Amino acid sequence: MATNKTKRRRHRRSFGAIRQFSSGNYQASYKDLQGNNQLAPQTFKTREAADQFLAIKQAEQIAEKQAREAGRWILNKDRGAIPLGEYIARHFATKQDWADRTRELNERLAKRWILTPVEGHHLADKNLDSITPLMVREWFAAVQRASFESATIAKTQKPLNDSAAAKHWAKSQNIIFEPLGKASSALLEQWRAAGSPQPVKPPASNELSPAGRTGAAQTYRLLKSIFNAAIDDELLDRSPIKEKAATIVRSRKAQAATSEQVAALAEQVPARYKAAVIVAAYGCFRQGEQFALARKHYNAFNRTLTIERAVKKLQGKPAFIGATKTVGSNRTIVLPRVAAEALEQHLELYVGNDPESLIFTNGKGSLVTSSELSGWFIPARNRAGLPTLRWHDLRSTGLTIAASTGASITALMNRAGHTSVRAAMIYQKLTKQDDQKIADSIDSQLDTAKIYELAHFREATA
């Protein structure tokens, strides 16, 4: 009897208990911090294994108790056991720093590519902590294929309505017509007499289209930001997003028009938009900023325009005036004389005296949206011999000229409404002409200051 009691005392523990079954296996039990009895989730073949389990549990309880006493947050090992789709909904609901268009884009991308299965890959149903880098790579490959297919379908030629087709035909036949509004009855009769031809669009490229690549990259960046947020929320220790190159899209570089090209374009647009072209080129505004300007924003005495708002357009909703892209976009800039003179003439001809009257409007006095702008800008640029010029390139024109004047990065950032040096540096392109200006300027300053004389230099180095 004494021997058995001694044996039992030898295995008595300060934390937990171990008992042996008739099968020879051992069961471990312990009390949690609330005083409730807990059994190990499995039995152990050896007493040493059961001892190790209890030692780990004891260490976890000591650490948790100390953390609670110190007021620290305790991470649950199962904290990542939440479906990705559920976390996205909670993350979007609590995200407060997104602009309206950013929120719209992210919600659309999430619904189309993450919350919906793509070629059988459905990440939304999986828990955060169960999604692996391999799963993400396979899903993203499917997104790229589907995005390319979607972009290709979007580029497929669709029949134009009679008015648009008639104008397109008239342009190809060098027939003069009114670019704004619907095609005239006479033009429609001519078009129908010619057989009602529709424009022929070149077939889409077999390579991944820029539109397809852009949509896929935007989706990948969104998923990356979601997993980074999960790490910040202490639901994960690491992200399964590993492919850095997946977020890179090499889009077409902005081109800067020459002053002669700007003048040619201004002559080709409808008269009410001539000043808009000149102000866009030399005022360096974003499209939305420029078409939200009102008479009150122009100071004729100082030749300044103040940017404090922008035109916004969300899918399925009418255009409206909202906040600028960033707080740093709010600014006041001085117009060059050529832009100020064009603007003042435009104000006199097309803008009412009310301070709230919009400066640039469509023919009906409403906001100029991207689709309306394209209706007159694209034909005008083609007539001016600038088929690849985009409206945003006019902004590049002004900023490139501003950079060539020797303006500081800070000054360029203020004029453009940039909040990062990287964005401003895009326009700091050194051309051969710029380099020659630098060399000539150095020579000029040295000659003026007479810093050295060649003879003295030779004597000093003899």
Image: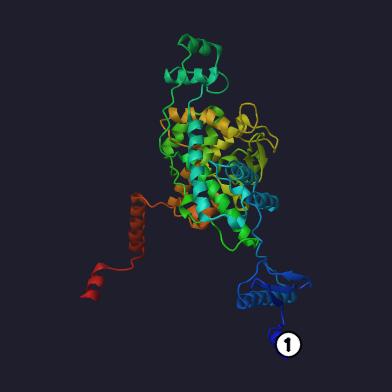
404 or 213: nearer the eye?
213
Image position of 257 (left or right of 20): left
314 or 66: nearer the eye?
66
Task: Point out the residue furthest to the bottom here.
Answer: 2
Sort mark 1 into few (<14), some (14-19) or many (20+) by Cα contacts within 10 Å. few
Q: From the viewer's perspective, is residue 32 above or below residue 116?
A: below
Quarter where residue 107 is shown: top right
Quarter where residue 335 is shown: top right
Image position of 86 (left or right of 145): right
Q: From the viewer's perspective, is residue 245 above or below residue 157?
A: below
Task: Point out the residue furthest to the left here.
Answer: 462
Q: From the viewer's perspective, is residue 226 above or below residue 303?
A: below
44 or 343: nearer the eye?
44
Name the residue type under label 1.
Lys
Q: From the viewer's perspective, is residue 130 above or below residue 399?
A: below
- Indicate the secondary structure of the residue bearing disc 1: helix
Q: Position of residue 49 (x, y in %)?
A: 61, 75
Task: Point out the residue furthest to the right here.
Answer: 35
Q: Position of residue 424 (x, y in %)?
A: 49, 53
Q: Position of residue 295 (x, y in %)?
A: 65, 38
Q: Which residue is mark 1?
A: 5
Q: Is residue 417 in view?
A: no
What residue do we see at 57% from left, 50% from top?
222
Image position of 442 (left or right of 327): left
What residue do we see at 61% from left, 55% from top?
128
**Which quadrant holds the N terminus?**
bottom right
**Which quadrant holds the C terminus?**
bottom left
What residue do we see at 52% from left, 13% from top?
188
